[in-house]
Structure formats: C-alpha cells, structure tokens
Image (tube, helix red, strand yellow):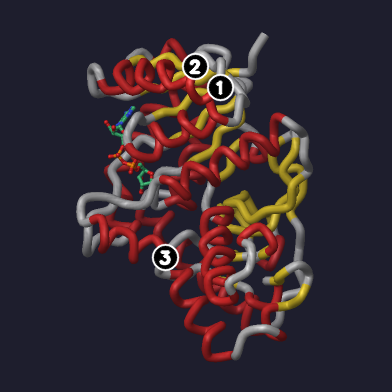
C-alpha cells in the first residue's frame, strides 16, 4: 500500500507541496482546503500531469478532513500568507485559530501521523499544533530551517558561481527577523566560506538570508514564497519515509538544549523514521548562542500573548 501524505491548505504552498510530492513518487496525496472546488481542481490538474511527468501518485482534492484518515504525514500549510508590510507575527491570532481547528481533525483522523508545520509564524504555530494535538514532540516539527538554509545555500552558490548542491549551510533560531545564519558552519564542498568569501560579503549574504522571505513578499506583492518552502517540506517527508537520519535545521521542541526550554525553535536535528530523533548541540560561540537565545526570548513573549 502506498504511503499517504495529507496536505492541509491547497493554496500556493500546499499545491506546490502536492506537485513536488507526486514528482518525487513519495506517496499518495490528499489535498484539503475549505474553499470548494480549489483542492478538487488542483488535484485533478496534478493527476492529469502524471502521464507526462511520469508519476502514478493518486492525488485527491477534497474539502472533507475525514479524507486525511490514516495519513502517515500531514503537512500543515493552511493559513493566511503575509502581505507587504506584515511581519510573520502579524498572522499570529488568525493562524492560531486555524491551527486549533485543524489539529482536532488530525488527532481524530490521523492520530499516528507526523505533522510538519509550514504555517506562519512558524515556530509559534508548531508549538500550538503540538499542544493542540497532544502528540509527542518528535512527531510535530516545523519546516523553516531547511528553507532558510536553502536560501543561504543558494546565495552562496550565486556569489561564488558554484553548484548549489555543493553548498551546505546551517541557519538556526526562529523563522523570522531573529533567525541566526551560521557562516562558520557553511561550507562549499567542505571548505568553510570564510576561506572563499570576504567578510563584508558574508555579512551581506547572511542579512539577505534573514530577510529572504520578506524580499519575495515585496516582489510578489500579493503573498509569500512557495516553491522553496514546498521543496523544503518535501525534503523533510523523504527524510522520514526513507529513514535518512538527515541532519537539517528544523523547528523542534527544546527541553534545555542551548539553555532554552519549552519552546519550538530552529536547531539542527536528525530526521528519520521516528521524526525528530535527536537534537544536535553545536559548540556555538558566545555571539551565536546569544543570538539564538535572544531569538528564543522573543518567541517566549509571543507564546505568552497566545495564552501559554
Ligand atoms: N482548512 C484548510 N484550508 C484552509 C483553512 C482551514 N481551516 N483555512 C485556510 N485554508 C486555506 C485557504 O483557503 C488557502 O487556500 O489555506 C490556503 C492558504 O493558501 P495561500 O493563501 O495561497 O497561502 P500560502 O502562500 O500557501 O501560505 C500558507 O504557509 O508559508 C506559510 O506564511 C505562509 O502561513 C502561510 C502558509
């Protein structure tokens, strides 16, 4: 029997996830949205691309959350995207309500699933999802670090005119203005970028990474990024299904690592068949650790606003 992935929200991110999932032949996909016709239409359209693109995944579009029954992974993309001038935190209360209602359905129909949260503000919504489902922390995690790291990887590759795939990067912290790009842990085929790129350019690239989502919001004017967020989510699904034990940055629940606890924030994790199997504790220097803890403190404040 094929694996099953439910994608909640058939908007830009959700539909792109469904497309990449089908193309990766990873699982059958159920695409759910509250807007009548949208998931059905996109599901049918994607199904009809199958013979040309060479995939056989079944893609069901639906308005009924019952159809997520038995899903192995749920990717949560439902929610409002950012508009120009909005921070991810501006979406807080609206998206928290949506997370709450979807979490109830996940608990009912896919109680054994892993949940990957993409809805913003990411780290807060992931915390809320875990609380509302009551799932173990290893089964609920947020897609953010993979996206932020892939942005940094792309910028470094563009700077040096080298293969994107040869660049490895690590971006920690919250998925927002307080994120912490780590140039010290960013390499090109194993060579630290400090040996290849001047300091002032590394600073500029790190800043562009932190503002990477905002740069796209500004350009699009009517919404936020979706291709890279979807690609990053699908990468995480593959790590779980194939038990890859992949080391990547994800929003994970901390219980004292990096001196931070009871919060979801971006850290390096080992992602495998049991979801977040381990959190890696890097030897951060004083400034890096300070930035990560500052990022965490911001989210603690936001959690308080949400009533936690
Ligand atoms: N159940 C299912 N779908 C819902 C629900 C719900 N309760 N509430 C809203 N939706 C749907 C909307 O109808 C819409 O089709 O979620 C979809 C969101 O799609 P877009 O508006 O295109 O937003 P998108 O760009 O996909 O971003 C979704 O991901 O990156 C984050 O910040 C982004 O929080 C946003 C989310």
Where's residue 274, x and y in %? 74, 34
Residue on which the image places disc 1: 54
Residue 110 lies in quadrant: top right
- Asked if marks 2 and 1 touch (Cβ < 8 Å), the reply is yes
Q: Earlier in the sequence, mark 1 or mark 3?
A: 1
Real-space Cα separation, disc 3 to disc 2, in angstroms: 35 Å
Nearer to the camera, 86 or 165: 165
The response on whether ligand 1 sits within 8 Å of label 2 is: no
Real-space Cα separation, disc 2 to disc 1, in angstroms: 5 Å
Q: Earlier in the sequence, mark 3 or mark 2?
A: 2
Count residues near mark 1 (Cα–Cα under 10 Å), then give few for <14, some for 14-19, many for 20+.
few
The response on whether ligand 1 sits within 8 Å of label 1 is: no
Residue 193 lies in quadrant: bottom right
> Mark number for residue 212?
3
Real-space Cα separation, disc 1 to disc 3, in angstroms: 33 Å
Count residues near mark 2 (Cα–Cα under 10 Å), then give few for <14, some for 14-19, many for 20+.
few
Q: Nearer the viewer, mark 1 or mark 3?
A: 1
Q: Is residue 169 above or below residue 127?
A: below
Residue on which the image places disc 2: 51
One can see residue 306 in this view: yes
Q: Nearer the viewer, mark 3 or mark 2?
A: 2
One can see residue 105 in this view: no
Where's residue 126, x and y in %? 50, 44
- Asked if marks 3 and 2 touch (Cβ < 8 Å), the reply is no
Q: Which residue shows up at 74% across the image and 47% down it?
A: 246
In the displayed image of the protein, which residue is found farthest to the front? 52
Count residues near mark 3 (Cα–Cα under 10 Å), then give few for <14, some for 14-19, many for 20+.
many
In this rendering, would 221 be left or right of 117?
A: left
């Amino acid at each position: 029997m094929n694996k099953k992935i439910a994608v909640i929200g058939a908007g830009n991110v959700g539909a792109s996830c469904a497309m990449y999932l089908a193309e990766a032949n990873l699982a059958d996909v159920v695409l759910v949205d509250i807007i009548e016709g949208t998931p059905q239409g996109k599901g049918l359209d994607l199904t009809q691309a199958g013979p040309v693109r060479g995939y056989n995944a079944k893609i069901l579009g639906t308005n009924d959350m019952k159809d997520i029954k038995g899903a192995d992974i749920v990717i949560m993309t439902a929610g409002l995207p950012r508009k120009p001038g909005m921070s991810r935190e501006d979406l807080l209360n609206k998206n928290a309500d949506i997370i709450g209602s979807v979490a109830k359905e996940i608990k009912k129909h896919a109680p054994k699933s892993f949940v990957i949260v993409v809805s913003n503000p990411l780290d807060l919504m992931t915390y809320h999802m875990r609380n509302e489902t009551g799932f173990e922390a290893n089964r609920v995690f947020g897609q953010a670090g993979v996206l932020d790291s892939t942005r940094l990887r792309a910028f470094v590759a563009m700077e040096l005119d080298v293969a994107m795939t040869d660049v490895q990067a690590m971006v920690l912290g919250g998925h927002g203005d307080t994120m912490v790009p780590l140039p010290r842990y960013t390499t090109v085929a194993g060579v630290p970028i400090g040996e290849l790129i001047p300091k002032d350019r590394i600073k500029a690239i790190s800043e562009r990474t932190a503002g990477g989502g905002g740069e796209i919001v500004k350009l699009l004017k009517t919404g936020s990024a979706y291709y890279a967020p979807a690609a990053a989510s699908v990468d995480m699904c593959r790590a779980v299904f194939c038990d890859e034990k992949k080391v990547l940055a994800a929003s994970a629940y901390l219980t004292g690592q990096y001196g931070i606890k009871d919060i979801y924030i971006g850290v390096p994790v080992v992602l495998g068949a049991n979801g977040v199997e381990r959190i890696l504790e890097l030897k951060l220097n004083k400034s890096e650790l300070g930035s990560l803890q500052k990022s965490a403190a911001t989210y603690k404040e936001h959690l308080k606003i949400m009533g936690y």
